[in-house]
Amino acid sequence: MILRADLHTHSYFSDGQLSPSDLVTAAHAAQVTILALTDHDTVDGLPEARKQAETLGVQLVDGVELSTQWTRATTKRALSIHIVGLAMKDFAPLEAVLGEQQVIRARRAEQICAKLEKLTKRPAWDAVLALASGRAEGITRGHLAQWLVNEKLVNKQQQAFDRYLGEGKPAYVPLEWLSMADGVAAIVASGGQAVLAHPTRNNLTATALRQLLVDFKAAGGQAVELPAINEPPATRGMINRLVAEHGFHVSTASDFHGAHMMWNKLGNVPSLATGQKGVWELF
Ligand code: AMP
Ligand code: MN
Ligand code: MN
Ligand code: MN
């Protein structure tokens, strides 16, 4: 059996469309052999996913995607960086930071909704909360973008980011996530592997990306996600070089959210280049 590792996916415990159980069923159908459920700043969907994985014989890895902020030493600018945690053994150190992240997430969602209500003159909160399965601590900008689409104020999610939700746009609320170093430390203290998520989707210059990898390594980060298969070969080449230079393991992932989202299909993951080591060797 060939190994197909999809180590970054979402359920409706964050901004994914499927239940954890349906996600595992869909991964099984897509011939995924190792699956990680990595909801934004929560591990609450894992028990349900675990049950279905045991029923179907899918190898499930406990995961999470932490929103963190990285402050570049040269510019002092804080940038939002996502760190995936995989195969944690003791959840206590991670849970300690997740509580605070969830408070931040719920508060930021309220602030963004207040801005959207003012800008659009329409009630937003109840509808956004319903999109997030009633969990305020799980609201992401993905839900807020979906609300703008549902209200026909924008055509698609990307337009919602371009007009309202992106950095510097009228409904943007500045970052206040935990630092990247603290996020990595919490994952490592929990016995997990810290993986830099979608490194080429952060709109960084090559110089900034290089510095990010140096800082991520220094913080204890072990692996970097390979670019999605629809990204240009030059992007993949750059990551291959950086991974080799710093001795990182690599992870493969779709960042699947559901059929409604622009990200990749479940199980649609890139292959490793010669000499690259899969992060699963560390589990
Ligand atoms: P948050 O963590 O609340 O800032 O929300 C980030 C989430 O919003 C991501 O995980 C994506 O699901 C979604 N997202 C981010 N950027 C975009 C974009 N340009 N278009 C559509 N969805 C996006
Ligand atoms: Mn998301
Ligand atoms: Mn992400
Ligand atoms: Mn994600």
Image (cartoon, grey):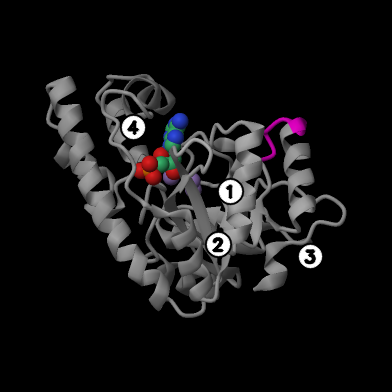
Type of amino acid at the residue the image marks with label 1: Leu
Left/right of residue 262 with respect to residue 163 in the rendered view = right
Q: Secondary structure at mark 4?
A: helix
Residue that numbered label 3 is attached to: 1
- Confirm or deny contact between disc 2 and disc 4 (CB under 8 A): no
The magenta stretch spans residue 185? no
Type of amino acid at the residue the image marks with label 2: Ala
Disc 3 from disc 1: Cα separation: 18 Å
Of circles 2 and 1, which is in front? 2
Q: Position of residue 181 (x, y in %)?
A: 49, 59
Return the residue nearer the eye: 185 or 233.
185
Q: How many other residues sit within 10 Å of disc 4, few (<14), some (14-19) or many (≥20)?
A: many
Q: Earlier in the sequence, mark 3 or mark 1?
A: 3
Q: Which residues are magenta?
A: 228-234
Residue at 79% x, 65% y is 1
Disc 2 from disc 1: Cα separation: 11 Å
Give the quadrant of the C terminus.
bottom right
Disc 4 from disc 1: Cα separation: 21 Å
The magenta stretch spans residue 230? yes
Q: Is mark 3 within 8 Å of ligand 4?
A: no
Residue that numbered label 2 is attached to: 36
Q: Is mark 4 within 8 Å of ligand 1?
A: yes
Q: Position of residue 194 (x, y in %)?
A: 57, 62
Q: Residue 266 got which mark?
A: 1
Left/right of residue 94 with respect to residue 6 in the rendered view = left
Disc 3 from disc 4: Cα separation: 39 Å
